[in-house]
Structures are given as structure tokens and as C-alpha cells.
Image (spheres, helix red, strand yellow):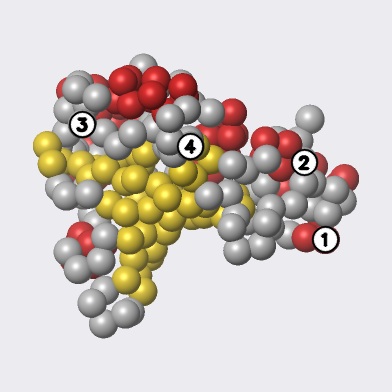
Amino acid sequence: MTQPTEQWRAILEIVERARKTTGHFAVASVDRHGIPNITPVGTVFFREDGTAFYFDRYTRALAENLATNPHVCLLAVDRGPLFWFRSLALGRFGGAPGVRLYGTVGPLRRATAPELDRVRRRVRPMRLLPGGRLLWSGFDQVRDITFTSARLVRYPAMMSHLPDIEPGACARIRAPPAGSARRRDSSRADQGSTGRPAATQSWIPSRYLRTLP
């Protein structure tokens, strides 16, 4: 199994905070005329290899845009009252309040048993209510997202103490250099069973992503 890099684990920590406080991620896409669209998607699941998948339901406009342009930007923002209160009280952020993830979306496919299990566990509390049973059912098809780069949500006035990222090259997610042991190990781990993309690596400084103490 592919082991996540320290930087990707930090990104996963941000998106998990965002999911818990917001309930969804904003996924931006563009249609064939160049008109943008933002779709809230609550069934995005991240993997440890720098990829994710989401259930293609209630995403009609997004699906139509992907037919001509597979590129997307996923925005995750921590809206937690405690996170923001502590940050404002201290006058600084202890970590990035959000992250933008850029990538491409793959074709529609049938969900695997483990993927179905993940969505069922996530929506189980909502399905205790009548409306939840109406909305949170019929999940059986997914799309994969392969992330290629990332950019943190920044508020410089409260983040000057944190390590900076090179302008124009913010937190690129890329495979390790050719021939490295890490790449060889990742390739072996990914081949054969899942068909998912090879492991990626984020070069975001881990201290920049750390949450408040």
C-alpha cells in the first residue's frame, strides 16, 4: 500500500477539517463556452496516493462540463468557529485555513465495494431522517480525480510568520524524481490491483499547513 508523504498528510488534514465544518467541497469546472460553474460535492473521498474519487450524483452541470474539459479546481475551507476564533484572538493562523487542489477528472465508472462502504458510513446519520433517505441514496457511480497541483488559501497579514511558497509554483504535487527508491516503491504498490494513478508528492512545507496548537 502506498504510504502518504508528510506534505500530503497535511493536505488531508486540511480537507478533513473543511469537510467536518462545511459538509462539502466546492468543485469548479468550465463548459465548452468558457463559462465557469461551481458544484458543491459532499461525497469526495481522498486517498493516500494524492488522488480522490467522488460519487457522480447531483452533479449534472459538472458532468456536462467534464465531457469537454476534464480540468477542475477543488476548494476546501475550514469554517470551524473555534479555528477562526482562536486565529483571530491570537492575530495569526497556526496553519492554512484552506487549500485549492487542481486536477483532472476521469470517466464515469461503477463504484467498488470498498468505495460504497465509505459513502454508506458517511451518510448513515443523515439516512436516519426521511429527507436523508430521499437524498442520500442511489450512489453507485464514481469518478476519479488525479491532482496535479495545489495552492493554499492565504491571508498574508496573519500568516507572515509561516514559511512562504515560491510564487507561481505553489505546492506542486508531482511524482518523485525518476529512478528514486520512493518512485519505484510507489509504482510497485499501485500496479495491478486498483488501477488508480501512481503516487504523487506534495512539496508544501509541512510547517505551513500545521494547525493551531
Between circles 1 and 3, the one closer to the viewer is 3
State the residue at coordinates (26%, 60%).
70
Residue 133 versus residue 84: which sits nearer the camera?
A: 84
Determine whether, in the image, residue 101 is placed left or right of residue 69: right
| Residue located beneath label 3 in the image | 195
Crowding at dot 4, Cα within 10 Å, few <14 / some 14-19 / many 20+, comes out as few
Q: Kindly report the distance in space between the C-alpha atoms of the residues bearing marks 3 and 2.
A: 37 Å
Q: Residue type at mark 3?
A: Gly
User: Helix, strand, or loop for circle 3?
Assistant: loop
Residue 82 occupies quadrant: top right
**Would you say 58 lies left or right of 109 here?**
right
Q: Amino acid at mark 2?
A: Gly
| Left or right: residue 179 compared with residue 92 | left
Q: Please give the residue where the numbered disc 1 appears in the rendered image.
A: 157
First reached walking from the N terminus: tag 1 or tag 3: 1
Residues at marks 4 and 1 touching, judged by CB atoms closer than 8 Å: no
Determine which of the numbered discs, if any, sits on residue 94 in the image: 2
